[in-house]
Image: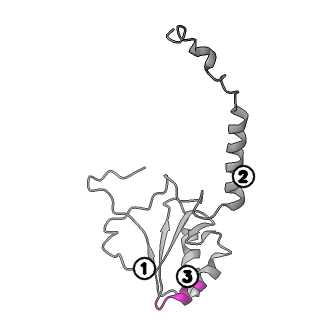
Amino acid sequence: MITRPLDLASRLRPAPRNFDALFLVNGGLIVLYFFLFGSRFVLAPGLGVGFQLPEMPGATQGAAVTTVVISVRHSDMVLVDDGMLNYAQLPDWLQARARQEKSPVLLVRADRNVPTEDMGKIAAMAGKAGFAGIQWAMEAPPPNGRGQP
């Protein structure tokens, strides 16, 4: 070895001790931080990868400008700007948003697996809240005729 002629190996510091436990404690503190001080912007629930809108020919032709947007992933799970709501909390939120707008129009982005009964409930809630219109988000099928499963 090249350090032998000058005896450099004797002047080196010893190898540091193993600090694996310190890294685990650090990781645990980070996880605890997210649980205690998390916000809706950090680790918030979202629509996910499997979210698919229903397909309908000519879906984009009837599109209108909307003022309020909600997303429905599953039955009784509505994602809004303020976080996640259930159907019991949704009417109060809709009324508060309808009061903020001049002529509110609601856009509902519902997954294709959401039952039609739930769509009717949401439409009734929006009508009672004072929305002037409701727009249902849909996609046009691909031009080659092959839809997604």
Find out whether residue 17 is within the magenta segment.
Answer: no
Give the alpha-carbon distance from disc 1 to disc 2, as whole Å: 39 Å
**Amino acid type of the residue that numbered disc 3 sits on in the rendered structure:** Ala
| Residue behind mark 2 | 32
Secondary structure of the residue carrying tag 3 is: helix
Q: Position of residue 7 (x, y in %)?
A: 58, 11
Q: Which mark is residue 35?
A: none
Is the C-beta separation of discs 1 and 2 under 8 Å?
A: no
The structure residue drawn at horizontal position 57% and vertical position 15%, both measured from the top left corner, is 8
Q: Position of residue 148 (x, y in %)?
A: 39, 51
| Residue behind mark 3 | 126
Above or below: residue 99 compared with residue 124? below
The structure residue drawn at horizontal position 63% and vertical position 66%, both measured from the top left corner, is 76
Foreground of the two, 39 or 10 = 10
Give the alpha-carbon distance from disc 3 to disc 1, as whole Å: 13 Å
Q: Identify the mark nearer the N-term, 2 or 3.
A: 2
**Amino acid type of the residue that numbered disc 1 sits on in the rendered structure:** Thr
